[in-house]
Image (cartoon, rainbow, N blue to C red):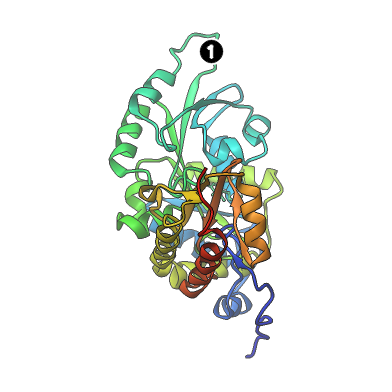
Amino acid sequence: MTINPEPAIQNPMIDLRSDTVTRPPEGMRRAMYEAEVGDDVFGEDPTANRLQETVATLLGKEAALFVPSGMMGNQLGLKVHTQPGDEVIVERTCHIFNYESGAPGVLSGVVLNVLDGEGGILTVEQVRGAVRAGYYWESPSRLLCLENTLNKAGGIIYPLDRLQALAAEARAHNLRLHLDGARLWNATAATGIPEKDYAALFDTVMVCLSKGLGAPIGSVLTGSKDLITSAHRYRKMLGGGMRQVGILAAAGLYALEHHRPHLAEDHAKARRLAERIAELPAFSIDLATVETNIVMFDVAEGGAMPVLEALKAEGVAMVPFGPATIRATTHRDVSMDDIESALAVMHRLFAKTIVA
Ligand SMILES: *Cc1c(COP(=O)(O)O)cnc(C)c1O
């Protein structure tokens, strides 16, 4: 069988905007082409079932559900744990609060109790202080949602001992726990701590296949059989019942087998990028925060936009993350050579900028 390879150069940009910009390589497309499929609304798609079993096993959970996006996985996580009027404790920089279109209020009718962590990380005392006493005029605290790695905080890994302490505190107050593990794979690649050791602390865990793993579409929500049965019903209610979805699940399985073992390479690229950005006086960067595949740095003068525009004109794309903050994310479609090219551009453009 031959598959037409995609055109060699679709986009000459060195695209560091996100790890979601990857395109499926030929082997993945072949796996999608060859996937055995069936109608998943009838539960008859063998490839989707295999993906769900594979991810459930990896995360040490009873069951798993394939969903089209990480956001749907998170929102189903909120939905299965809460009743309208309940309160969900989150950290201010989290994806659920910042980038999910207000869905917790609309889809689950919950109130978010937003805490200010340090670098996205909460303390036990903060969670203890946020739990409602139980008066009837309060919204009852029901769920604690955490994120690992922390996206907006720069790809930082939530330390396992802190997660354990937070989970113990949450359990002491009968809270449920949901993990937004969009990049949990990166935490494991960096620390060597198996995904299931993180997942064991949570009732539900969402993981993305479409970030650093490089699948075109798809995330997975994992949990107990009962919780996933409930999530399955709500997925259908949201219009997320899919038919021959094994075409997509095959990409996820391919990503887990062939791409997951290489995530540490993305971290090495991010480290190289960060270390040479640190040499430029036009920027400030805290190298200690570069733990995985995300690099955040501040522009000393003039804000992020002029820098981003100058870089874009030279074929390097990054994104603003605040008025004077820039985020660059490494992934499997940028090589170490691309990183060196991007750094050459940055050093040429910004080496002479003197901090005022
Ligand atoms: C990307 C991301 C999501 C949501 O994923 P989508 O598939 O884009 O909906 C959720 N949480 C975090 C931390 C993410 O980075």
Could you tell me residue 33's position as x and y percent? 63, 78
**Res 173 seen here:** no
Q: Residue at x 63, y 46 (%)?
A: 235
| Front one among 353 and 48 | 353
Outermost residue on the left side: it is 161
Is residue 321 placed above or below 127 in the rendered structure? below
Q: Name the residue that disc number 1 marks.
A: 138
| Front one among 126 and 350 | 350
Is residue 293 placed above or below 337 in the rendered structure? above
Quarter of the image holding residue 26?
A: bottom right
Is residue 349 placed above or below 159 in the rendered structure? below
Q: Residue at x 41, y 33 (%)?
A: 118
**Res 16 seen here:** yes
Q: Amino acid at mark 1?
A: Glu
Could you tell me residue 312's position as x and y percent? 66, 62
User: Which image quadrant: the N terminus?
Assistant: bottom right
| Front one among 333 and 241 | 333
Could you tell me residue 119's position as x and y percent? 42, 38
Left or right, 352 with respect to 217, comes to: left
Q: Residue at x 47, y 54 (%)?
A: 294
Disc 1 crowd rating (10 Å Cα; few below 14, some 14-19, many 20+) is few
Could you tell me residue 82's position as x and y percent? 54, 30
